Amino acid sequence: MLSEKIQLDADESILIQVRKHWFIIMLQIVSVVVFALIPLAAFVLLKYVPITVLPISFAEYTPVLISLYSGWLICAWMALFGVWTNYYLDVWTITNKRLIAVDQHGLFNRHTGSFRLERLQDINVTIHGMLATLLDFGDLHAETASDDRDFVARGIPKPQELKALILSATDAITYAQPQSIEKSAEV
């Protein structure tokens, strides 16, 4: 799993790891399967068209059509592999001190960013549409004190619960720090 690759501090622990909602990946998989079946459906439909309309015979071109369709299926298989890779490697990890976001774009393009929870300024949840409301998935936008980059997780499950978890971890860090400062000042 990816959690072994994350370098944690001594007193840091992973609270949750979040990937996209299952419905998002299922939509992508269904679209790839439909893409794979389009030539087969076209061939079946053309087979029932009267020969007088089509001047060619598919029987003599069967090996060529099978080769072309095999290449089409290989492309669909690679697209399916890309969908799964993007789903599996695109992950948000929330620890008791940090938020670590890994955004996978394609097979060889990955952006990893993190910020400490005490730098969190604002966190917003956006849920678009009736289906997203019923299945409880949406987008989570986390803004930090820096102007570099906002952290956006798209299509994650239960975004309200994740927001509450991040805010409670932020509160635990924010309110624990003044006590540690007071203790160090007493010593």
Image (tube, rainbow, N blue to C red):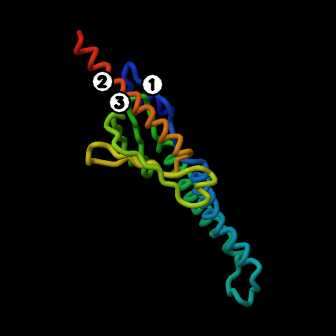
Which disc is residue 13 wearing?
1
Which disc is residue 54 wearing?
none
What residue is at 49 percent from the left and 39 percent from the top?
A: 164
Q: Which residue lies furthest to the top in this view?
A: 187
Q: Residues within 10 Å of mark 2 (few under 14, many from 20)?
A: few
Q: State the image quarter where residue 182 is shown.
A: top left
Q: Distance between the residues labelled 2 and 3?
A: 8 Å
What residue is at 22 percent from the left and 15 percent from the top?
A: 185
Instruction: Name the spot of residue 122 as percent of width and height, x first.
Output: 37, 45
Q: In this view, does 174 lie to the left or right of 44?
A: left
Which disc is residue 178 wearing?
2
Q: In this view, does 184 lie above or below 139?
A: above
Instruction: Name the spot of residue 88 as percent of width and height, x first.
Output: 52, 43
Q: How far apart are marks 1 and 3 (CA)?
A: 17 Å
* 113 and 176: which is toward the camera: 176
What residue is at 36 percent from the left and 27 percent from the top?
A: 175
What residue is at 56 percent from the left and 61 percent from the top?
A: 129
* 10 and 59: which is toward the camera: 10
Q: Residue furthest bottom?
A: 52
Q: Is mark 1 on a helix, strand or loop?
A: loop
Label 1 amino acid?
A: Ser
Q: How crowded is mark 1: few (under 14 residues within 10 Å), some or many (20 or more)?
A: few
